[in-house]
Image (cartoon, grey):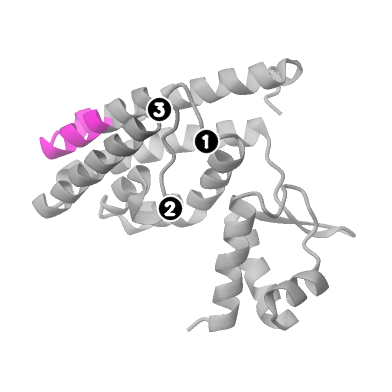
Amino acid sequence: MRDSTAERVFVELRQAIVEGRIPPGSKLSEPVLAADYAVSRAPLREAIGRLEALGLVERRPRIGARAVKLTGAGLMELYEIREALEGTAARLAAERMSDAAIADLQALMARHRDEVAREHGQAYFQQAGDLDFHYRIVASSGNARLTRILCDDLYHLMRMYRCQFGMKSDRAREALTEHGRIVDAIAERDGELAEWLMRRHILASRRSVERRLAARNPTTTEDRS
């Protein structure tokens, strides 16, 4: 059983890093953080160690722990991994989700349609956990190892990129439509189609992000850094 203080600090630090309140590349000073979170060094170090395991913190010799610094190349690598693994998750979800779980997923999509309409199609940024479409699909795959990889190891790192590279996108309506098609395939129990649609959806998102990154910094297009 984990120490409750360490767990609290872990969750709060994770959120601060994901949302950019602890800026990418900034040093995690133990004295400062211990004072900010009103904890001793032991639970703080445990929390930082867990964040390092998630890829949100990195340690360097003579420098110490820092919030991971975002790069375009790192984001593209995550998209490549997601395309393969989330495609598999969608196929498994189509085969294994209960009718009640599919009905809940359809209700989630209805909620997302309302949210995008309120934003006039300019934003489609979902809350964390079960309210996140991708998280819900992966968690419904019935494959514990796949779920750990995507929902524990990569989820918060991907969410950090999504937060800090910008929430608004000209793909909001397209992404919503693509999500709807994936849900329809899952509801029809068509695993092959669900996998193909999910892979195509993530590929389209990756290409859109590549274009935006290139527009921001054309000199780094070649190495995506």
- Give the answer, above or below, for where 30 lies relative to 51: below
Which residue occupies the extreme right position in the image? Answer: 62
Relative to residue 144, is residue 206 drawn left or right?
right
Nearer to us in this view, 95 or 51: 51
Q: What stretch is highlighted in magenta?
A: 180-195
Of marks 3 and 2, which one's residue comes earlier in the chain?
A: 2
For the question of whether residue 53 can be seen, the reply is no
Q: Earlier in the sequence, mark 3 or mark 1?
A: 1
Q: In this view, does 95 lie above or below 180?
A: below
Residue drawn at x 31%, y 43% as measured from the top left: 89
Write down the residue under mark 1.
167
Locate residue 173, reporting x and y percent. Answer: 35, 25
Q: Name the residue under label 2.
A: 128
Q: What residue type is labelled 3?
A: Ala
**Disc 3 from disc 2: Cα separation:** 17 Å
Label 3–label 2 contact, CB within 8 A: no
Of marks 2 and 1, which one's residue comes earlier in the chain? 2
The quarter of the image holding the C terminus is top right
Rendered residue at 40%/35% (across/down): 84
Q: Which amino acid does label 2 sit on?
A: Ala
Specify whether 125 is left or right of 92: right
Disc 3 packing (10 Å; few <14; some 14–19; many ≥20): many
Q: Nearer the viewer, mark 2 or mark 1?
A: 1
- The image position of residue 146, as x and y in percent, is 37, 51
Q: Is mark 1 on a helix, strand or loop?
A: loop
Main SS category, magenta section: helix
Q: In the rendered structure, find residue 198 and report the number of the disc placed on it.
A: none
- What is the spatial separation of the Cα atoms under label 2 and label 1, in whole angstroms? 14 Å
Residue 212, image x, y percentages: 59, 21
Element type where label 2 sits in the image = loop
- Residue 116 lies in magenta, yes or no? no
